[in-house]
Image: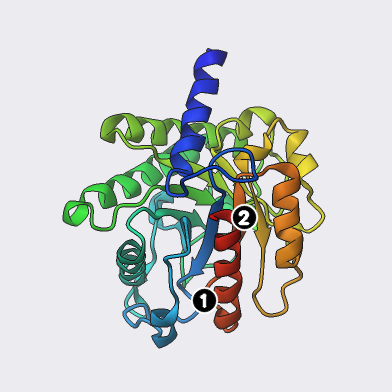
Amino acid sequence: MKIKLFSLLLATITLFSCSSGSSSANGGTNGISGAWFYIADTQDYYKIPDFWNQIPLNDVNVLYIGPAGIQDNNKFGLYNSESTGALSNRFQWLIAKAKEANPAIKIIISQWWGNGQGKWGMPLDTLKSETDINEYAQSVANFIEYYQTYENGKYAIDGFDIDYESNNVIERFPILANRIHETLQQLSNKYHKQFYFTISPADIEYLTMPSLAQVDYINMQSYAGGLDITPESYFALGVSANKILYGICPETNCETPTTEEALATYYQYRMAGIHLWRLNSDNYKYEIAVQQQIYTALNP
């Protein structure tokens, strides 16, 4: 069983990095250059903000999209109401744009935290029982499978993320992690395609060694509220450096490592890559420049 698990993790790391290519200083394939796109700053979801068209996505290996959340009956999905319209409109627009810019891009949808009622849905602390968790985990798989086949896979995505902070930090996380892993593995077997489970923690409460063994990648929030959490915190939980992406946040007024510091940490620990929060704030021109700099460094 241990040999099979090691082989699966090794295959997962190779697949997630496959859009990067040749060897580099992190000790294997080129680093993963990830970036985030937040699609609910305004709540007229049938309108695409004009400046989004100016944001290039060709320098992104993995695109994380949020916010998604819990809807009615513990179902994971994208918000829709008469007052806002369907958030899926922006989601699908962004996926089409990303795949046109970079056909090899991986796309991950993220379960958000906070108060999303009337905007994107509800966080994980809405789940009050193991039955709720089972229903939710299956709905995540159902969501991904829907887009795998909808319009011949035009908007197909590659996995699921949990923005692990605040009211997404739940005592039952180990149960949830196990169920998410199981449902995504079933999808992977069905479609002969790897579907990834990632988490993006600003908190490590309730994260255990067995639960993190179910996760393919960790996106460190090494900025803002997660600044005090170090790579060693994850090493102590059995996570290897080649499953960790270091974080950087060029958004306005976000306390963050500099680009140079983020790259130095990536090289020091031989990490999987670097992820950037985010590409589409009011500081987007600078965010684009930082993303391009990181991508170039990780994909020489």
Q: Residues within 10 Å of mark 2 (few under 14, many from 20)?
A: many
Q: In the rendering, which numbered label is found on residue 297?
A: none
Rendered residue at 76%/70% (across/down): 255
Residue 161, x across and y down, in percent: 51, 50
Rendered residue at 37%/45% (across/down): 139
Mark 1 or 2: the one toward you: 2
Q: CA distance from mark 1 to mark 2?
A: 17 Å
Residue 236, x across and y down, in percent: 78, 33
Residue ranking furthest to the right = 228
Residue ranking furthest to the bottom = 50
Q: Is residue 220 above or below residue 257?
A: above
Which secondary structure, mark 1?
Answer: loop
Q: Quadrant of residue 232?
A: top right
Residue 172 at least partly seen: no
The scheme the figure's colours follow is: rainbow
Q: Nearer the viewer, residue 292 or 195?
A: 292
Q: Quadrant of residue 208?
A: top right
Q: Give amino acid for label 2.
A: Ile
Rendered residue at 48%/36% (across/down): 14
Q: Which residue is mark 1?
A: 280
Q: Is residue 4 above or below residue 51?
A: above
Q: Is residue 246 above or below residue 84?
A: above
Residue 206, x across and y down, in percent: 70, 39
- The earlier-in-sequence mark between 1 and 2 is 2
Q: Which residue is mark 2?
A: 274
Residue 147, x across and y down, in percent: 28, 52
Which quarter of the image is occupied by the C terminus? Answer: bottom right
Q: Is residue 120 above or below residue 227?
A: below
Residue 260 at least partly seen: yes
Residue 252 horizontal side relative to residue 291, left or right: right
Which secondary structure, mark 2?
Answer: strand
